Image: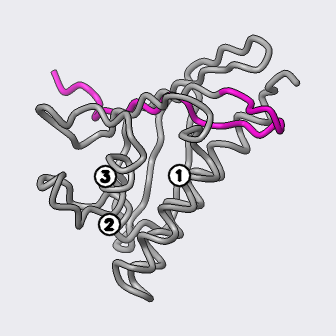
């Protein structure tokens, strides 16, 4: 059950599509709709039910920089959680498109790592690009799950 380059491409596309779906649900149904879509995203794409997930979102700081729990990741995507007061809801930003550009990959059996750039486009056509690293592991059912999610803004010298 080795991970393939095609699996990595599919996983990145699924992540981008789900991010866009969170924004669409927020616009159509409000925070409850967005939270439902984000919760399903975390269940479907991340490995929280199979072991630890190392999650470091782009816009997090201080003691909440790292989010090892599903609750912390959910708050990052949709905010509205008093335990994470600085979250603004990355998934609520009106995203319309997402694309990635690979810098490098590593695959060994059922574990893979990817790093590159992810660019998301909002409803006004403005792009935001982040440096992204994902680590993946196939679960016992053969589904590729995110076990590491690290994101940061590109360095500005």
Question: Would residue 53 appear left or right of 87 to someone viewing this image?
Answer: right
* Residue 131, quarter of picture: top left
32 shown above or below 49: below
Label 3 or label 2, whichever lies nearer to me, is 3
3 shown above or below 59: above
The part of the chain drawn in magenta is 137-157
Distance between mark 1 and mark 2 Cα atoms: 18 Å
Distance between mark 3 and mark 1 Cα atoms: 11 Å
Task: Tell me which numbered mark, 1 or 2, is placed earlier along the sequence.
Answer: 1
Residue at image mark 2: 93
Secondary structure beneath disc 3? Answer: helix
Q: How many neighbours does mark 1 have within 10 angstroms: few (below 14), some (14-19), or many (20 or more)? A: many
Q: Position of residue 77 (x, y in %)?
A: 36, 57
Q: Position of residue 40 (x, y in %)?
A: 57, 62
Residue at image mark 1: 42
Residue at image mark 3: 76
Q: Position of residue 130 (x, y in %)?
A: 37, 38
Label 1 or label 2, whichever lies nearer to me, is 1
Q: How many neighbours does mark 2 have within 10 angstroms: few (below 14), some (14-19), or many (20 or more)? A: many
Question: Would residue 86 appear left or right of 40 to someone viewing this image?
Answer: left
Secondary structure beneath disc 1? Answer: helix
């Amino acid at each position: 059950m080795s991970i393939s380059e095609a699996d990595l491409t599919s996983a990145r596309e699924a992540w981008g599509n789900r991010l866009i779906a969170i924004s669409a649900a927020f616009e159509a149904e409000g925070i409850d709709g967005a939270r439902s879509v984000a919760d399903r995203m975390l269940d479907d794409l991340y490995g929280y039910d199979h072991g630890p997930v190392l999650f470091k979102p782009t816009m997090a700081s201080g003691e909440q920089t790292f989010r090892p729990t599903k609750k912390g990741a959910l708050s990052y995507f949709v905010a509205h959680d008093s335990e994470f007061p600085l979250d603004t809801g990355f998934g609520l930003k009106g995203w319309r498109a997402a694309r990635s550009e690979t810098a490098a990959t590593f695959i060994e059996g059922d574990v893979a790592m990817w790093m590159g750039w992810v660019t998301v486009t909002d409803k006004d056509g403005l792009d935001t690009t982040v440096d992204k690293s994902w680590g993946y592991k196939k679960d016992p059912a053969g589904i590729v799950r995110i076990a590491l999610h690290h994101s940061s803004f590109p360095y500005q010298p």
